[in-house]
Image (cartoon, grey):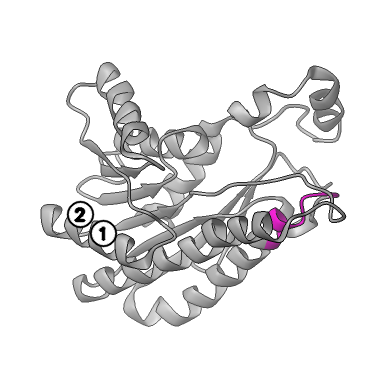
Amino acid sequence: MKLLENKVAIVTGGSRGIGFAIVKRFLEHGATVVLCGSRQETADKAVAAIKAENPDAAVEGIAPVLTDPESVRENFEKVKNKYGHIDILANNAGISARDSVYDYKPDDFQKIIDLNVNAAFYCAQEAAKLMKPQGGGVIINTSSMVSIYGQPSGVGYPASKFAINGLTKSLARELGKDNIRVNAVAPGVTNTDMLAVLPDAVIQPIINQIPLKRVGQPEEVADAFVFLASDMASYVTGEILSVDGAART
C-alpha cells in the first residue's frame, strides 16, 4: 500500500542520515520528494544515489539557505509553482554539539539555535502559507529523545529540541483550523554516520540502557514520518512521537 501517492513533500536535511531515509521512504510510498541539502552538490549527490537504485524516482535536490527566510520563501515557492502543491514538510535539518557549559562558545550556541529552531520556524511558516490556500497539509518536525530528558552536556541541542516541541504543539493548535496538522518525531539513539564514529566502548553502555537492547535504524524513524504524513494519522496533531526503543535516560 502506498500511503503518500500523489503527495509532494519537502525534506530538509534530506541528503544524509535520518533525512535521507525519510526521502527514500516517502518515495517508496508514492510521494514526489524535493530534498534539501546544505549545498547543491550534497543534494545532487543524494539524488544521484537514489536514482542509481531507481532511475524513475520522483526526486530532486535543492539547497536553500534555511537560516535565511527569503531563501526559504523563494525555494518553496519554486516547488509549489513546479508541482502545483506542497502537501508535506519534513523539518529535519539540524546540528548538535556536546560541549560542556563551561566551554560553550556563544557563537556555537547561536548556530544551533539558528538552524535547529529558527530555520525550522521559517520553513514551517512558509509551508503553512502555501498549504492554507490549497486546503491543508502536514508539517513534521524532527525532535529528539533529549527534548524530553535532556543530556549531560551540549545544552544547546536539547534546548533547541525543547523549542521544537513547543513549536510543534503551538502550531498544531494555531493551524488546525486551516487543516494543517503539525507533529514531531523524537528519535532515540539511531544508527547514523554520527553514531558510527563512536567506539564500541561508548556505544555498548548506551545499548545496555535501552530495553530493546539495540539502537534504532534510520528507516524505523522514517516509518514514523510516513505514518504522520499519511491519512492514517488524519486525526493526529500536536504529538511528539518517540521512536527510541523506550530509552529513558
* Amino acid residing under circle 1: Phe
**165 lies above or below 201:** below
The label shown at residue 76 is 1
In percent of the image, x 31 and y 25: which residue is there? 50
Question: Circle 2 — which element?
Answer: helix
221 lies left or right of 156: left
Is residue 223 one of those drawn in magenta?
A: no
Placement of 45 over or under 235, stated as above or below: above
Q: Position of residue 162 (x, y in %)?
A: 67, 64
Residue 62 shows up from this direction = yes
Q: Which disc is residue 204 wearing?
A: none
Magenta span covers which residues?
152-159
Measured Cα–Cα span from mark 1 to mark 2: 5 Å
Do the numbered discs 1 and 2 sit on residues whose CB atoms are within 8 Å? yes
At horizontal 81% and vertical 51% (from top left) the residue drawn is 151
Tell me the crowding category of disc 2: few under 14, some 14 to 19, or many 20 or more residues within 10 angstroms, Cα based.
Answer: some
Task: Give x and y (percent) for residue 86.
Answer: 24, 58
Q: SS for tag 1?
A: helix
Q: Closest to the observer: 2 or 164? A: 164
Mark number for residue 79?
Answer: 2
Under mark 2, the amino acid is Val
Q: Is residue 236 visible?
A: no
Q: Is residue 121 toward the left or the right of residue 53 in the image?
A: right
Compared with 133, 231 (above or below) is above
